[in-house]
Image (cartoon, rainbow, N blue to C red):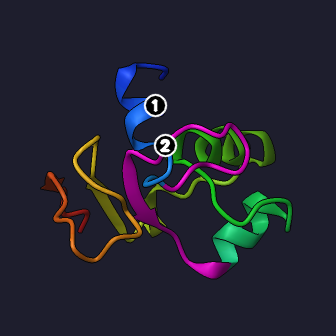
Amino acid sequence: MILADTRDDIWCDQWERCKRCLKRQKWAWAVDDDTWAKVVQGRWSLLCLECFDDLAAVVGVDYRRVLMALTFVGWMGNVASESQQPAAAIPLA
């Protein structure tokens, strides 16, 4: 998905947060709908990559081959904001 530092207070209203651990999203990422459903099982609408990874391990889902995008946004911008550019993009395939 991710903590407490001075930037958390400054940026807290601008960042999307994981619905499970409530930490800021530092990675923008995506998996296909079937994989999401198997891992999340309808419990959360937004997860950080760390929480998703933990849950995937619990239910035995290897999602590495279906991870479609992975972009580090760090503290530079809000993953929900189209006006901010990602700090770095990592091609996955």
x and y, in percent, of residue 46 in the image:
64, 61
Query: Given the image, on which type of amino acid does mark 1 rest?
Result: Asp
x and y, in percent, of residue 4 in the image:
49, 20
x and y, in percent, of residue 40 in the image:
77, 60
Q: Is residue 88 above or below residue 66?
A: above
Crowdedness near tag 1: few (<14), some (14–19) or many (≥20) residues, C-alpha within 10 Å: few
Please report the residue visible at 34 percent of the width from the left and 67 percent of the height from the top: 69
Residues at marks 1 and 2 touching, judged by CB atoms closer than 8 Å:
yes
Please report the residue visible at 18 percent of the width from the left and 63 percent of the height from the top: 91
Query: Given the image, on which type of amino acid does mark 2 rest?
Result: Cys
Q: Which residues are magenta?
A: 16-33
Which secondary structure dominates the residues rendered in magenta? Answer: loop
Identify the image quadrant of residue 61.
bottom right
Crowdedness near tag 2: few (<14), some (14–19) or many (≥20) residues, C-alpha within 10 Å: few
Q: Is residue 44 left or right of residue 21?
A: right
Helix, strand or loop at label 1? It is helix
Q: Is residue 93 magenta?
A: no
- Which residue carries the number 1 mark? 9
Helix, strand or loop at label 2? It is loop
Please report the residue visible at 50 percent of the width from the left and 51 percent of the height from the top: 13
Residue nearest the viewer, comparing 84 with 65:
84
Q: Is residue 60 left or right of residue 26?
A: right
- Which residue carries the number 2 mark? 12
